[in-house]
């Protein structure tokens, strides 16, 4: 529940344009997508049990938006993608 609630909050903040999607993607994008993939079936079951689509809807929304980002690649970490970075 802590994970779900945390990413629900991120989702709402991105939607309300309080936090840029690019920043959330850089901070936790791969984690959001990975965890949504692991928890989606459980969330869908919870939605059926409760007869509502509102269980972790912003978590799902956030994972879907992150995956739509140009250049998103869950297999390539920042340590690889930005290895040539110079201060």
Image (spheres, helix red, strand yellow):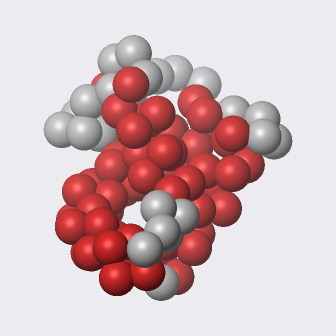
Question: Where residue 27 sits: x, y (%)?
Answer: 53, 47
* Residue ranking furthest to the top: 70
Left/right of residue 48 with respect to residue 7 in the rendered view: left
Furthest residue toward front: 51
Depth check, front residue: 73 or 51: 51
* 10 vs 80: above or below: below
Which residue is nearer to you in this view: 55 or 34?
55
User: Quadrant of the image for the C terminus?
Assistant: top right
Residue drawn at x 58%, y 30% as measured from the top left: 22
Which residue is pictured at 33% across the width and 73% down the height? 48
Residue that appears at 26% across and 30% down: 73
> Image point 18% across, 38% down: which residue?
75
> Residue 34's spot in the image, x, y percent?
27, 55
Residue 56 appears in the rendering: no
Q: Is residue 48 left or right of residue 15?
A: left
- State whether residue 63 appears in this view: yes
Task: Return the x and y of residue 16 as percentages of the image width and height.
Answer: 78, 40
The image quadrant that residue 37 belongs to is bottom left
Q: Nearer the viewer, residue 11 or 22?
A: 11
Q: Is residue 83 left or right of residue 73?
A: right
* Image coordinates for residue 56, horizontal then vertical, percent: 49, 65
């Amino acid at each position: 529940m802590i994970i779900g609630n945390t990413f629900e909050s991120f989702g709402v903040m991105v939607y309300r344009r309080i936090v840029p999607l690019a920043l959330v993607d850089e901070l936790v994008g791969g984690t959001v997508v990975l965890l949504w993939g692991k928890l989606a079936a459980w969330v869908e079951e919870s939605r059926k049990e409760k007869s509502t689509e509102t269980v972790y809807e912003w978590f799902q929304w956030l994972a879907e938006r992150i995956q739509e980002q140009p250049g998103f690649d869950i297999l390539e970490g920042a340590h690889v993608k930005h290895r040539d970075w110079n201060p």
